[in-house]
Amino acid sequence: MIVTVSTWELLVPGAASLKDKRSVLRSIKDRLAKMNVSVVESGLQDLRNRARLSVAFLAAHSAQADSILASVDRLVADARGVRVVGSSTERF
C-alpha cells in the first residue's frame, strides 16, 4: 500500500475577501472529495489571495497512485479562480 500526500500553494487573484477565497476553495475541495481523496486547506487561511491545499490518499500500487495523482493535479491546475505557484508530493 502506498500513501500519497500532495500539497499545492495557490494564488487566488480575484479574491477581494476571505469569503471570496473560501468560495473558490470550496468548489475545488468539493470536486476533489468526489475523487475519493481526503482534502484540507492546510495553511495560509488568514491571507485573502493565497491558499494551501493538501490531498492524501491510499493506493494499492505505485501505478494506481500515479494515476490518481495525475487526475488530482490536473483538477487543481485547471480550477477556475486559482493559479498554482508551487507544489510538493510525498509517498510513504
Image (tube, rainbow, N blue to C red):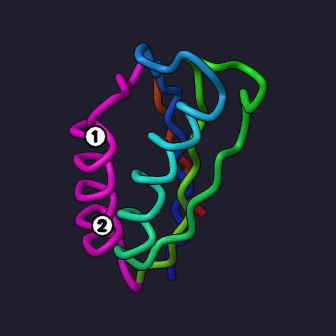
- Residue count near mark 2 (Cα–Cα under 10 Å), binned few <14, some 14–19, many ≥20: some
Q: Give the SS element for disc 1.
A: loop
> Which of 62 and 6 lies nearest the eye of the viewer?
6
The location of residue 62, given as percent across then percent down, is 34, 70
Span highlighted in magenta in the image: 60-85
Please determine whether, in this image, residue 46 is positioned above or below residue 79: above
Q: Residue visible at 70% across and 19% down?
A: 47
Residue at disc 2, secondary structure: helix
Residue 68: assigned label = 2
Q: Which mark is residue 66?
A: none
**Above-or-below relation of 22 to 9:** below
The amino acid pointed to by label 2 is Ile
**Circle on res. 79:** 1
Residue at the image position 48 percent from the left and 26 percent from the top:
10
- Position of the C terminus, as image quadrant, is bottom right
Residue at 48% in and 57% down: 29
